[in-house]
Image (tube, rainbow, N blue to C red):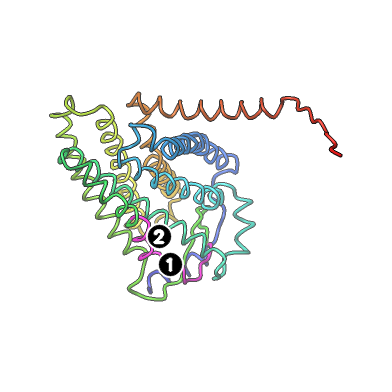
Amino acid sequence: MVEIDAATEFLRARISCDSGDTDFSQYMKFGIQLGYVVPFGLLYFSFLMAILRRRRHCEVFEDSFFALHAVDGVLTLTFLILDISFIRINTYVRPICEYFVPLLKDDSYNLTPYFTIYLYAQFAKMLSTLMMSINRYTSVNYPLVHKSMWIQHCPKAIVAILLIPLLFVWPVAIAKTCFLPNKGQALIMYEHHFRWARTSFGRILIGGSTLIFTIFSSIVTTYKLSKLGKHMRRVEVSLTIATIFMSFGFALMLIVQVVQLVVPLNTFIDDPWLATFLLGGTQFVNDFYMLSGPVVLLILDRKIRKSILHSSLRRSNSNKRILEVSARPVTITETHMF
């Protein structure tokens, strides 16, 4: 607790929304990120809608993996919306950062709900990655019992994804928070009421467990695919490869975060280029981890592409029919009965 409090006071004395780059350069960085996050986010939203609309009527989406993927999609989009709407916009748009600093730099509960949901979505996303990796591992290594196993345990896995993060974010939910940007990087700090209750412990436990299993699972499933790929359904192969991509993105994200934790805070202050490089790398790797799954699936599997397209076309045709009906002239005849 002493180190965190010291870090908070250290940052409070050095509040700055100026990254050292020109405003135009910062706007360009933010625009580039929006340029790929928004379209891929909309693609993920379309993918999520297709799963929810067609899960009971399309053989492709009946697999338990897609139930987990639907939960993952909601968590991913929630996190990205929260991240862009405050963290990133305050990092890259200096006037907005300068507007919020006087309002939020002091300890208060103003940012507590936002930061609690932000961390909750982050932890739950890690758990959904773990559950999808377990799903693909059992699919490849225990194909005869995989379906029946997940019919029984998929609801429990979803409940675990949604409930376990609460064990690690409650210290934030009861704490005061403050907004302390440093060299243009938006940072939110929170009070620590209990030495033993920190979100860093959750990151180590959930992130470490997910990393170890995803690496193990990726190695085993990649080996199995090289041996059995020709005897597996194409969609199963696509789901497994997409999960491996997500696992790779998750590993990169943790590596970057570990580097940020290991490098002393004053190093970032003395070397702004290092801070800028790590910030950009963290955000790009995080976006790759968040959004790569559905993109890989759509590239690899023709049935999934057709299902997404069919869902979009059906929604478009439905809207057209509504417009046609509403545009038809209606004749109203009044009849007076005596």
In the displayed structure image, the side of residue 149 where residue 300 appears, left or right? right
Give the vertical position of 126 relative to 220 (above or below): below
Q: Position of residue 173 (x, y in %)?
A: 46, 68
Counting every numbered tag in the picture gives 2
Where disc 1 sits, the SS reads: helix
Q: Amino acid at mark 2?
A: Leu
The residue at the far left in this view is 227
The residue at the far front in this view is 338
Q: Which mark is residue 265?
A: 2
Give the vertical position of 109 relative to 279 (above or below): below
Magenta stretch, residue numbers? 161-179
Q: Position of residue 313 (x, y in %)?
A: 51, 25
Distance between the alpha carbons at the discs numbered 2 and 1: 8 Å
Report the residue at 30% width, 35% height from top.
242
Nearest the viewer among 338 and 39 is 338
Q: Which mark is residue 7?
A: 1
For the residue carrying disc 1, how many other residues have a C-alpha within 10 Å: few (<14), some (14-19), or many (20+)?
Answer: some
Where disc 2 sits, the SS reads: helix
